[in-house]
Amino acid sequence: MYVTGSSEEAIDYLLGRWPFDNRTRHPFPEVIILDLGLPGMDGAGFLRWLNTRAEPWAQAPVVVFTANTDRAVAAQAYALGAREVKVKPTDFTELVDIVDGVLRRWKPHIA
């Protein structure tokens, strides 16, 4: 699992730009977990960018996390291709449990 700090860094990762050019160390994701409230390009902008890509990795399921409970925000994320939208809990342990469940759903071979 690799965590990026921004949409721009995630784009560099997916495109294999330095320092992510070694695919042994930085393989293509099977699942993309995305926060809508990212610095720079927000999560919606990242989803729009992802929709322009034809590479196989662009078909990886995207699970969106947001602190916003407005249903319109979730609807927009679904319209942009998210497979799931989750409200971020304030408790870190709960967040870890939710992410674990998401990964088990979308990557069934995880032990």
Image (cartoon, rainbow, N blue to C red):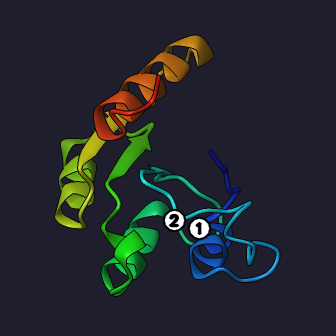
Q: Residue at x 47, y 51 (%)?
A: 34
Work out how far the residue at label 1 is from the one at label 2, CA to CA, in angstroms: 7 Å
The front one of 34 and 39 is: 34
**CB atoms of marks 1 and 2 within 8 Å:** yes
User: Residue 111 versus residue 3: which sits nearer the camera?
Assistant: 111
In this picture, residue 93 sits left or right of residue 102: right
Q: Quadrant of residue 19?
A: bottom right
Residue holding disc 1 = 7
Foreground of the two, 45 or 105: 105
Q: Is residue 34 above or below residue 71?
A: below
Disc number for residue 68: none
At a point 37% along the width and 69% down the height, the residue shown is 47
Sequence-first tag of 1 and 2:
1
Q: Nearer the viewer, residue 22 or 8?
A: 22
Vertical comparison of 6 with 71: above or below: below
Q: Is residue 43 above or below residue 71?
A: below
| Residue 25, image x, y percentages | 74, 60
Say what amino acid the circle numbered 1 marks. Ser
Q: At numbered mark 2, what does the secondary structure look like: helix, strand or loop? A: loop
- Depth check, mark 1 against mark 2: the one in front is 1
User: What residue did someone put label 2 on?
Assistant: 42
